[in-house]
Image (cartoon, grey):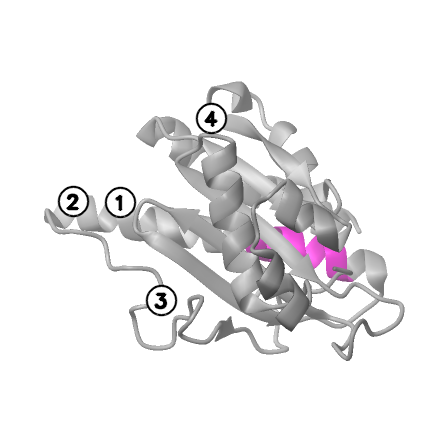
Amino acid sequence: MQREENATGSAAAGVVHSLSQRRETLATVESLTGGLLSASIVEIAGVSGIYRGGLVVYATELKATLAGVPADLLAARGPVDPDVAAALAEGGRQRCGADWGLATTGVAGPEPQDGKPVGLVYVAVGGPTGVQVRELHLDGGRDHVRAAAVIEALRLLAERIHAADEAAIEGREPAQAGAPAGAGSAGNGPETAGDDARDGLGTAGAGRR
């Protein structure tokens, strides 16, 4: 658990620093992580300059009424879906008036949900160049899945910020999210993460709703 906390703190500090340097803001929308993502972000000193706020939309209907996910999409796909994750990220970004939106949805367990297995998680980033979704398959217990989902969400955001920075240095437009080979986006099929964790935490994803 201490290792997970350290990894989360490091990832959160990195994105807060990067956004501060860029003078850009962030909003979060959480389902399975239930506030863990926003809590990890506000632990970082100086976060008030970049963090606009967040929504915890655990109940499916609140994803529509608060985060703006189309009700027909939720009815057809359920809450654990890549397009729902993308809509959560973009909805949070717009409703909180932020430059970036970061979202989580998935099945943390202990039981499968609507035919979706425990450990299936989607994290999504909405930003100036579009939305990118990553599909995660996490193992371990409920707490581990939720903690890993937070880390992987922050990592995805860091990657998108880095891509935007590189594009700015090279004087070109950043690649649209989901455009590079192997990268997923809503409508193009989610990017997936395997079961081998980069830090020993397991794969990306997991958590309920």
Secondary structure of residue under mark 4: loop
Residue 165 marker = 1
Instruction: Look at 63% across and 71% down and name the residue there.
Output: 76
Disc 2 from disc 4: Cα separation:
22 Å
Disc 2 from disc 1: Cα separation:
6 Å
Residue 179 marker = none
Q: Relative to 62, does residue 137 appear above or below in the rendering?
A: below
Proximity of marks 2 and 1: CB atoms separated by less than 8 Å: yes
Residue corresponding to mark 2:
169
Instruction: Tell me, yes or no, if residue 206 can be seen here.
Output: yes
Residue 50 marker = 4
Q: Magenta region: which residues?
A: 145-153
Proximity of marks 4 and 1: CB atoms separated by less than 8 Å: no
Q: Amino acid at mark 2?
A: Ile
Residue 148, magenta (yes or no): yes
Instruction: Tell me, yes or no, if residue 14 can be seen here.
Output: no
Q: Residues within 10 Å of mark 4 (few under 14, many from 20)?
A: many
Instruction: Look at 51% across and 66% down and name the residue there.
Output: 134
